[in-house]
Amino acid sequence: MLKCFRNCLRPSSLSTLPLQYGILFPQVSVCLVHLHFGHFSSAVILVTSFYLSMNLDGCAQDPEKREYSSVCVGREDDIKKSERMTAVVHDREVVIFYHKGEYHAMDIRCYHSGGPLHLGDIEDFDGRPCIVCPWHKYKITLATGEGLYQSVNPKDPSAKPKWCSKGIKQRIHTVTVDNGNIYVTLSNEPFKCDSDFYATGDFKVIKSSS
């Protein structure tokens, strides 16, 4: 084993080192940086334990499944008192509302311009509860994430404005309750949602506790 490992470290074998090292140590990922200085060569091997991304049963977990696994965000008693809470679920910021006995979760930033929805008011429009963005008063249905607006027939100015839907603009996530705990499961719907643009990165609004 030692002889085989020495052969792996020979300068002539540097190009095949990741493959050979992976065979010797299948539970380690290796990043090889090969630096040349004249007639000398040096290799820097950065070793990261593979078990950090493994399940309890020792099997590697699918990153996609991990991203859409349920995450506990708080206690049912707490959100019933505050009627809303914010959380980070797999690096995605969401807001959870408790309204008239029902739970709703969506991206925390408004699809229009990134307004903080957790600071908005909930109002009913056309018989549908909506969160109203505090920045530009955009109205988003809690249940479906549709953007609502009022339209008027220009050919009939006397007609009453009618509520219409722009379609789904805000990504909605699933909320479940188990033993008094609130869990959020991110949406894995394949369509692109306008709120995706503000969901991560520089637009984060939840301050880190560190």
Image: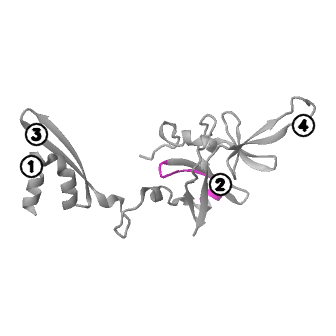
The three-letter code of the residue at mark 2 reads His
Which SS class for mark 4?
Answer: loop
The numbered disc on residue 160 is 4
**Residue at the spot 58% in from the left edge and 68% down from the top edge:** 178
Q: Which percent across, then down, holds residue 163? A: 81, 41
Q: For residue 125, which quarter of the picture? A: top right
Q: Label 3 crowding class (10 Å Cα cut-off): few <14, some 14-19, many 20+?
A: few
Q: Label 1 crowding class (10 Å Cα cut-off): few <14, some 14-19, many 20+?
A: few
Q: Nearer the viewer, residue 44 or 19?
A: 19
Q: Nearer the viewer, residue 154 or 170?
A: 154
**Residue at the spot 11% in from the left edge and 57% down from the top edge:** 5
User: Which residue is tagged 2?
Assistant: 104
Tell whether label 3 touches label 2 (CB within 8 Å).
no
Q: Quadrant of the N terminus?
A: bottom left
Q: Nearer the viewer, residue 195 or 73?
A: 195
The three-letter code of the residue at mark 1 reads Arg
Magenta stretch bounds: 78-91
User: Which residue is tagged 1?
Assistant: 10
State the separation of the CA atoms marked 2 and 4. 31 Å
Q: Which percent across, then down, holds residue 50? A: 30, 58
Tell whether label 4 touches label 2 (CB within 8 Å).
no
Which SS class for mark 3?
Answer: strand
Which SS class for mark 2?
Answer: strand
Tell whether label 3 touches label 1 (CB within 8 Å).
no
